[in-house]
Amino acid sequence: MHYEVRVRGRLNRTLASEFEELALAARVAPVETVLSGPVEDQAALHGLLRRIESLGLELLEVRRLPADPADDDG
């Protein structure tokens, strides 16, 4: 499954390095960072959310993205 997670503000390089497995995009208005990419399962999603909390980031939104038809096995 692919998820998109939005946090308030822009991540500096140190914080961004904590999310190397995800794509990061900064938005200007409102100022936020969008983390997106594959998340293996619910346990991995909860781990990602705990990491965001432990880094003191303000979580704005979590969305599961529609499945990519190219990812289907058959």
Image (tube, helix red, strand yellow):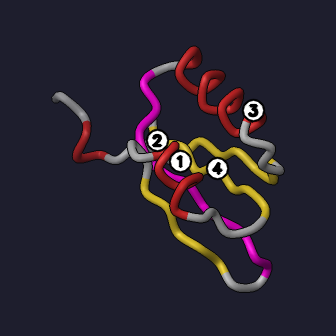
Q: CA distance from mark 1 to mark 3?
A: 24 Å
Mainly helix, strand or loop, the magenta region? strand
Going from N to C along the chain, the mark reached first, 4 or 1, is: 4
Going from N to C along the chain, the mark reached first, 2 or 1, is: 2
CB under 8 Å between discs 1 and 3: no
Going from N to C along the chain, the mark reached first, 1 or 3, is: 3
Q: Is residue 33 left or right of residue 39?
A: right
Q: Quadrant of the N terminus?
A: top left
Q: Position of residue 33 (x, y in %)?
A: 64, 65
Q: Nearer the viewer, mark 4 or mark 1?
A: 4
Q: Residue at x 39, y 42 (%)?
A: 21
Q: CA distance from mark 2 to mark 3?
A: 22 Å
Q: Which residue is mark 4?
A: 5
Q: Residue furthest bottom?
A: 29
Crowding at dot 3, Cα within 10 Å, few <14 / some 14-19 / many 20+, comes out as few
CB under 8 Å between discs 2 and 3: no
Q: Which residue is mark 1?
A: 65
CB under 8 Å between discs 2 and 1: yes
Q: Is residue 42 shown above or below 35?
A: above
Quick one: 1 or 13, which is closer to the camera?
13
Q: Which residue is mark 3?
A: 54
Going from N to C along the chain, the mark reached first, 2 or 3, is: 2
Q: Which residue is mark 2?
A: 2
Does residue 34 belong to the magenta stretch?
yes
Q: Residue at x 80, y 43 (%)?
A: 56
Q: Which residues are magenta?
A: 30-40
Crowding at dot 4, Cα within 10 Å, few <14 / some 14-19 / many 20+, comes out as many
* Amino acid on which the number 3 mark rests in the picture: Ser
